Image (cartoon, rainbow, N blue to C red):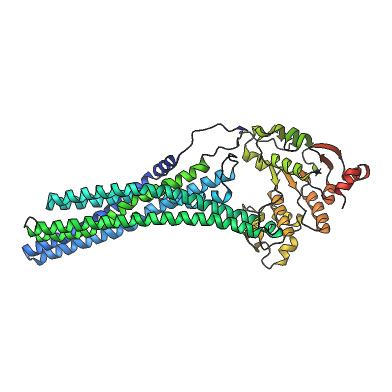
Amino acid sequence: MTTAEKKRPRPGSDILRTALRRNTGAMAGGTVLMGLYQAGETAFPIALGLIVEHTMRDRSLGSLGVSIAALAVIITTVSLSWRFGMRVLQKANTTEAHRWRVRVAECGLQPVARDLDLKSGEVLTIATEDADQTADIIEVVPLLISSLVAVLVASVALGLADPRLGVLVIAGTVAILTVLSVMSRRIGSGTREQQARVARAGAKVADLITGLRPLHGFGGNHAAFRSYRKVSAEARHQSVTVARANGAYAGAALALNAVLAAAVTLTAGWLAFEGRITIGELVMAVGLAQFIMEPLKLFSEMPKYVMIARASAERMALVLNAPPVTVPGSGRPAAGGGLEVDCVRHGVLRELKFHVAAGEFVAIAAYQPRAAADLAAVLALRVPPGAYEGVVRVGGRDLADLSVEAVREHLLVNPYDGEIFAGTLRTNIDPSGTGRSVTAAVEASMLTDVVALHPDGLDHPVRDRGANLSGGQRQRLSLARALAADTEMLVLRDPTTAVDAVTEQLIARKVAALRRGRTTLVITSSPALLDVADRVLVLDDGVVTAEDTHRNLLATDEGYCRAVAR
């Protein structure tokens, strides 16, 4: 893995173009169907005008029957084209939104540039609301084109009756769009700020939920709530500002459309009074003047939705443009190899050097918690190889030369504060649903009492973050998940700090038995886990200062005895 090279940022407009390009076929089909819908809607008042014209002139029942049949065809066309057109467009919309949600989530789960000022709550908002609003462009463009079709058909029909009516519709439409396009820019800029503030409020909520227990512990929950209330109030204020702009936009669009419709109606009435158009053409003109308000309204709203989609796309670009901390290699570690840390300097680690042979169970007694955290971060790829000195080798190959996927398939580092997800005990232990080693993992982590306690067993519901489990139960559930993964190399950091001494003894023996023959590294101060290890490395002041079995160290090293004896 090497430090990421700077690439040209992908702006929001590129994201929109990608979305449009990927859905060209669906948009073309949707545009044709929605164009038929708008053409049918426009044809309805035209047909009514022709019916009046022929009925008054011919007074024939046959002509009336043909007219009614023509109306039935128009109504059927309108109904079916709307139904299938919206189905095509909405399917493409939801599919595209899914693609962007997955893409943003994938970037959010990978290491990204550290100077990106986005928290997990903000990334969540971008992956949901912004992805959905960006994908709306798939519907916006066909609806824009179909609305234009309706306006053009109406203009041509009115122009055939009298050119002045056609010119009036075209000129009025251009004037309306000019005014509204200026207003839509303000909505776009306001929407970007609103999305940013709402995302910050969401991130603040996520942080508060994560730290709720510690906050209660030292009485900081009220101060935290006030902090969130301030952020939320800022988001509310910006939302109100955007709502006002949207209201002004909608009001202006409605007023301008009504003015145009009234102008067409009055002009048609004046022309009919002057005898320049027939009664049938007057009926058609009045009907089109009423009808044209709907496509004009839709047509005039499109610039606003385009600006919203672009604002959301630019928000997504913040995540998608963030370069990874490292550009991974393409290699894979050799099967059956060990783990080697060679002269690593990072944080409080100073020239740290040790080797864990394949199939060995090694424990590290870290006297300083920061050293344990720094070592776990390096092994878990949370720190790129270029950010520390020295080399880490997995399966005989440098970590920098391996792909992230290959490393994580081969080496699992179970975090100290493993996340518990909403679902069941089973889905937390075995998220992929493969069912491998679940029973053995439950036994080794001593989660059996939790499973036996509930009638549903492994299907017992678990709330978000394990809110309905105790601290020890959450820790054992996280340990069970790590064991069930059954990776060739496993690193555990303080996996038993929240369980009692008896349970800890049982877990230590069972984990050692389950992991026999596989490489295991445990960073811990637990005497039980230290005792079952093949050997113990003492990590003090950033370096390994002693190495032996737990019992030999207890007998010969007074400092070790004071640090780990309970």
Q: Residue furthest right?
A: 555
Which image quarter holds the N terminus?
A: top right
For the question of whether residue 147 can be seen, the reply is yes
- Residue name at image x 68 percent, y 68 percent: 455
Q: Splitting the image into 4 quarters, where does residue 447 fall?
A: bottom right
**Is 141 left, or right, of 281 in this rendering?**
right
Tell me residue 340's x, y (percent). Answer: 75, 35
266, 480: nearer the viewer:
266
Residue 470, percent from left and from top: 72, 61
Instruction: Specify whether 77 is left or right of 303.
Output: left
Residue 196 rendering spot, x and y as whole percentages: 50, 49
Residue 33 visible here: no
Left-right relation of 332 to 135: right
Where residue 126 sits in the image (x, y, percent)?
A: 51, 49
Give the quadrant of residue 50: bottom left
Q: Count of labels shown?
A: 0
Of residues 185 and 557, the one drawn nearer to the viewer in this rendering = 185
- Say above or below: 336 vs 44: above
Which residue shows up at 61% across the image and 52% down it? 432
The answer to whether residue 17 is left or right of residue 552 is: left
